[in-house]
Amino acid sequence: MLRLDHIVKTYTTGEFTQDALKDVSIAFRDNEFVAILGPSGSGKTTLLNLIGGLDRYTSGNLIIDGISTKQYRDRDWDAYRNRAIGFVFQSYNLIPHQSVLANVELALTLAGISRSERRERAKTVLDKVGLIDHIHKRPNQLSGGQMQRVAIARALINDPTILLADEPTGAIDSQTSVQIMDLLKEIARDRLVIMVTHNPVLAEEYATRIVTLHDGEITSDTHPYEVEELTAKPLTKQRVGMSFLTALSLSFTNLKSKLGRTILTAFAGSIGIIGIALILSLSSGAQDYIDRMQADTLSSYPISLAASGIDFEANQGEFPTRGDEPDQPVKTDRIYQAGDAATTLKHRTIHRFQNDLASFKQYLESPDASAITDLTTDIQYGYPLDMSVYTKDSAGDDVLLGETRESTGSPFDEMRLSSGMSPQTWTELIDNPTRLQEQYELLAGSWPTDHSEVMLVVSQDNTIRDITLYEIGLKDPSKLEELREQIDQDITIEAEEPQSFAYSEILGKQYRILQPFDYYIATEDGWSELRDESALSVDLDEAVLVEIVGIIRPVDDAAAAALNGTIAYPKALTDHLIDRLDDAPIVEAQRSKPSENVLTGLAYVDLTELTDDEVIETMSEAEQAQLSLLPDADRSAYLSRYRAERADTYDSVMERLGFVSAEEPSSISLYLSDFDSRQLVLDLIDQYNDEKTVQDRTEEVIGYTDVVGLMTTSITDIIDIISYLLIGFVSISLIVSSIMIGIITYISVLERTKEIGILRSIGASKGDISRVFNAETALIGLASGGLGIVISLLLTVPINRLIERLSGAQNIAFLPPGAAFLLVVISLGLTILAGLIPSRMAATKDPVIALRTE
């Protein structure tokens, strides 16, 4: 039973107020055909909308089955429209992009009915109205009468207790009108039908009750219904709602109906995704290339431990700025301090470390270091051997080699020397024949078998640098000195023709090696240093003789090679030179008199114990002259520095003699088979350091700098920074496309305003409407993301070909699956975000106004 008690409906526009219904009270039977007559503006449609729950009364009460609707919330009205009300409109109000079957079953979808049951019930009701043969047609393929029958079928699908018809025959011809009225009369046998019409003839012929309205008031009622107070039926709150899949289906068919615009929108939204995907493809490919290069080449670079060095990692870091201090207000009339002096000085200070390599060598040779030695392919101990290398020039005279490289005067040499890099023409072979022969191929001769045999190392294209040819004596070193003099005098020099050498010219070439102690001979007055040519000719007969027995070069597929020099000698030569030092007479003499300088015959004097005047007496005339020019304030500092630097000690004399101990290497090189082993060894060294720290033996802690790791990390950081910057720029297009999608969604809301009204009239809630448009933006987002990924994958093909042509690197650009999935998710999220405001606007539209929109 439906009853209206003193219903008032007022519309307010600005300061203008109009009463559409004035104190209307009427009750309806459960099954009757009521026709509401009246002129335009009398309040007929307003009354119908109030009864149907599309509009809200200003005052009064609408009672449904004995229950007041004053406390109804939005979801209660939605359930009421879906389960109790069926609407038939004058203009049919069918959703144009849905089929006849889909239009009819939509109300059942909101009610949560299963798909199979929906289809069956929809077909039954369409058969009842005579449209079973048209269920797959679109509304625009039907006649006016057929569309109205579809509207009636949609109104009946939920078996409502009340059918509301607003001018159901207003848009069809008279013959079809009769058919529609017959159908409504048939329906009214078992339910309440309320029809608004302007046609009194139809009302008289078909209606069982005629109610006349004028200026918002009931002026007549042919069959009024008076009821006493009835016991209210318990209100069963049944939640209705559209599933997201249903919303997707509605949106998908709508997008399909505008396929061209949908494709263009998806492509526009995919541009940002394409840009980011290509950037990620290149950056991830570059990172993968670096990883592969690490695996292929870093095993060729040993872990080098030096006796002393600079801790680059300790010097890394960012200088603090005022921006690092949170919650600090900025005043434009003040100057602020950035950071603090202690932190700044800490970053400016060069952190050095000293390594006790003697202890570490002892550790490596013990069983405790098996975890490290098992991972290494070779352990090479370096010693600061001072070698003077002589060979025969073209005239057959002995010439000293090795001085020419630092005397060319080129800017590169100055840069190299200032940076501390020491050029190595002679280098020691790694003591691992298998590994060595994997990296190098023998071009001529044989591999060395003892300390007197060395190898010549050439590049992969069988070349040796021009300067190096002078340094190893293949070209006359005196000619290089002549060239330098001509350059100094700005004399034009014609470029010489490049030379080539037969293997036979190189094999068998001999060198003689002298060590610093070889320049000293015993005399009656002690030991004298010999540097004149006649004396050296005698000494060279006692020098260590070596000759080139083989020529090697890196194999074609070698990513890197272990040898940096041109003349490579075996470890046996290093051992032999150290043994010579041990057996040298002058070295033995100095050992036997540790408190006396054997070079001067004087006892070692600590200058720190002398007075300033006594120290000055030990200076040369030039040093005394320099001191005399200094102000008094600087004389003391100069003398202190002189004492520290000029005092001869036992160690300094032994160093002058070139002495090194086999137990005290100046460097240790650990060769690894792969990059994973490298990291494991570094971890084991850290573990060794931790143990020494716990034992309070910090002087034995080993400091190292993983230069290769720092370098590759820096490259990775640079790639990441560039990628982030590019992604930042490309992200702007994502924002623009998101705004565009938001605008397009808003346009879609405007285009589908009537559809919003239709959905609300059959019980769709505001949330359901939001879901429809959110589903539409989600579909566009998925399409944009998917299209962007597909286009990106297609573009990587020519990009990879271009990179391969330019650099030789293959398959650099590739998009990881995880990144592709993430980009699709980002596209989906951005489009949904962009559509939130339009979808909310759609949900808040007045269904009555929406139904009137064309």
Image (cartoon, grey):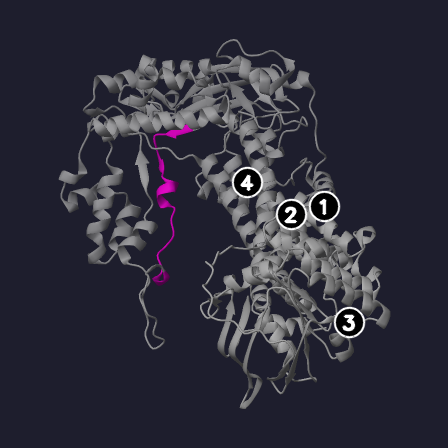
What x and y, as percent, mark residue 103?
71, 57
Q: Nearer the viewer, residue 839 or 25?
A: 25
Q: Is residue 386 visible?
A: no
Q: Position of residue 151 (x, y in %)?
A: 73, 62
Task: Give the amino acid at mark 4.
Answer: Thr
Tell which circle, 4 or 3, labels the residue nearer the N-terminal end.
Answer: 3
Residue type at mark 1: give it. Leu
| Residue that carries the numbered disc 4 in the rendered image | 408
Q: Which residue is mark 2?
A: 278
Q: Which quadrant would the C terminus be assigned to in this image?
A: bottom right
The amino acid type of the residue labelled 3 equals Thr
Alpha-carbon distance for marks 4 and 3?
A: 107 Å
Q: Which element is circle 2 on?
A: helix
| Residue 795, numbered label | 1
Q: Nearer the viewer, mark 3 or mark 1?
A: 3
Density class for disc 2 (Cα within 10 Å; few <14, some 14-19, many ≥20) is many
